[in-house]
Amino acid sequence: MNLEKVVFGFFVLLALTLNFGFVMGDIDNPAHHHAYELYAAIIVSAIATVLKFGDRSHMGAVLLATSLVADLQLLMAAFVWAMATHVMGGTDAEIMPSVVSLAGGALLANVASAVLLIIETAALRR
Amino acid sequence: MPSRPERVSALSKVHFLFFRRMRAPLIALIATYSLSILGLVLIPGVDESGEPWRFDFFHAFYFVSFMGSTIGFGEIPHAFTPGQRLWVSICIFLTVIAWLYAIGRIISLLQDPAFTRATTEARFIISVRKISQPFTIVCGYGETGYLLVRAMAHRDLQSVVLDQDQANIDSLLLENLGMDIPAFCADASVTRHLLEAGLSSSLCRGVVAITDSDSVNVKIAVSVKLLRPNIPVIARAGMQEAVDNLDSFRTDHVINAYEVFGEHLAMTQRTPSVHLLHAWLISLPDRVLHPPVTPPRGAWVICGYGRFGSSCARHLEAEGNSVQIIESKQEKAPESAVVGRGTEAGPLLEAGIRDAVGIVAGTDSDTNTLSAIMTARELNPALYLVARQDRHADTQIFQAADLDLVMEPSRIIVWRILPLITTPLLSRFLRLLRSGTEEEASRLCGRIEAMCGQVTPETWSFTVDREQTAGLFAALDGSMEIQIKHLQCAPTNRDELLPCLPLLLSRGDINYMLPDPDLALHRGDRILFTSRSGTRQTMSWTLQNPKVLEYIVTGDELPDGTVWRWMARRRA
């Protein structure tokens, strides 16, 4: 067992599950989408990205790319949320569909990441 | 074909090294920031009116951003409770430590030898890629490499240098050559480094392998011949096995340094004008002409019987001289040799220095060489003094010693290599000259001297084709005969002759040495000219402009424009 692989797999999967947890629920109901969960998803996704730095294999490069996409989508979601409620003075209910759909995009990228990880593991003959 | 990913990976190595080392500090930064933000969001606060209030993520992020970088705008948006202050003071230390860790890691990374080497390599690759003119790869920047690269730079020829010794590379960087020459400290026998130096580039015109090691030169030649069979390779070899090895896989030009040296020494006796013409034709234009050398024949003493000494002895004996050798090492000395130091009077006298006509001193160190020469001169002031100069840096003391002939092996090698790179036709001409007679060469010397006065001529070549000589190529459509003498006429007045001399006309496999002025030109001919400097520009009028050519051949001024041409035809 390789501790590095455990940590790496842990963060990739945790990024996916947190993202999924945030997106789940009615798209326009603020009660179904908590800010803490989005925050956790962003942090874990950022750490997962850093863990993918410096891998020279082709698989590593694609994993990094999916991770960067997820980061971008999640940060956009947080930015849109903060912009709408604090700067424009709107309510959570109004902006929630945009935030959740952006986070939903990130979910796709995280799923791709996890699938790649599983493929890599399956291809390993040890 | 050479693989491209190889080069890409060498470049991206820098980024990968950087990111791999920065993993831990970046995660530490993310962790401390997220912990600080989370803590602020969770701890309850009170606003000015006493109402309970909490940080939202947006304001917490804002606060931690300026707190972490220790800018400190105060307690925003409301004054903090003691609980919040406690948490913030912990956070300040956490974030400062995280930043110190990250910055410290970056600085140590910049000083890391692996990282600096990767950056220099990347910079070298980038500067090679930026070259926009044809270039030559020079492997080995020792004495010969230094002279070659300098001579090429003076002729505006780009080179790329590989050398295993960082000190040599540093000396190149300090050299003021007037052009940017990419140089990298690496083993040139490693194929990857040759590729990084631009071997796979379409602008690469040749590879010169002149490292000190024969085996490295052979390895370079093999790699180049396998990767780019069409690129010419010029390799230096010291041992006969290496020469045979290089010849076996058709290395374009193999130069045996020791052999070439002895050959030139013999040349100074048998055909001094040929030796002189080498110096004149290869030199840059408008330099002082080397004076002719005339070593006497008779008994010679040779100090030092290494590979140079033996080559000299062989060539001198072949010229009909008697040779006596002085060698300090018993095991290297041949049977008839005097064993002893050439720097002392005893062995010199024993070798018969008083009756000798000349001495060739070439020991391993320039100091010993000069010392032997001085001692010999004391014993016999009439001696003809020939010394082998090993290091270019010693030029001044050799000049001060007032010798009859100083031969610098690296310079002679450069004489052989340089025309191969600049004007291959000149190289062919010199080869033909070496197999020719002294009479011919001395007549040629006289003509060049009469043409240029006391300075060296400019030597260049061109091919009669569409790119280089458009006007001449177009005029040679069979309608009129153009002879070499026409090219020698001044474009302004056809009765005047330009100060130039055709040396060689090459047509397919046929070489016309010093071609007859009445020889008719054909398309595809390659012609080598030597002239007073500046004549080349004047002659390019004749070569490029059909009107000028017409005037020179027929004496008629061709009218410009359709109307005037039509009128001229009517009048005729």
Image: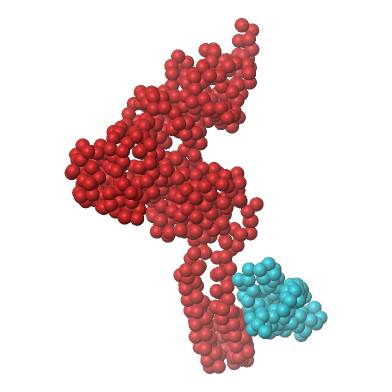
Residue B469 visible to an observer of this rendering: no
Q: Position of residue B344 (x, y in %)?
A: 21, 51
Q: Position of residue B170 (x, y in %)?
A: 40, 57
Residue B468 visible to an observer of this rendering: yes
| Front in this rendered view, residue B65 or B278 | B278
- Quadrant location of residue B41? bottom right
| Front in this rendered view, residue B341 or B431 | B341
Q: Residue furthest front?
A: B335
Q: Residue furthest right?
A: A26
Colour scheme of the rendered structure:
by chain
Vertical position of residue B308 compared to residue B457: above or below? below
Report the number of discs.
0
Query: Horizontal placement of A47 versus A20: left or right?
Result: left
Residue at image coords 29%, 53%: B328
| Front in this rendered view, residue B260 or B345 | B345
Chain in red in the render: B
Residue at image coords 38%, 36%: B318
- Quadrant location of residue A76? bottom right
Indicate the colour of chain A.
Answer: cyan
Residue at image coords 49%, 50%: B241
Vertical position of residue B466 compared to residue A20: above or below? above
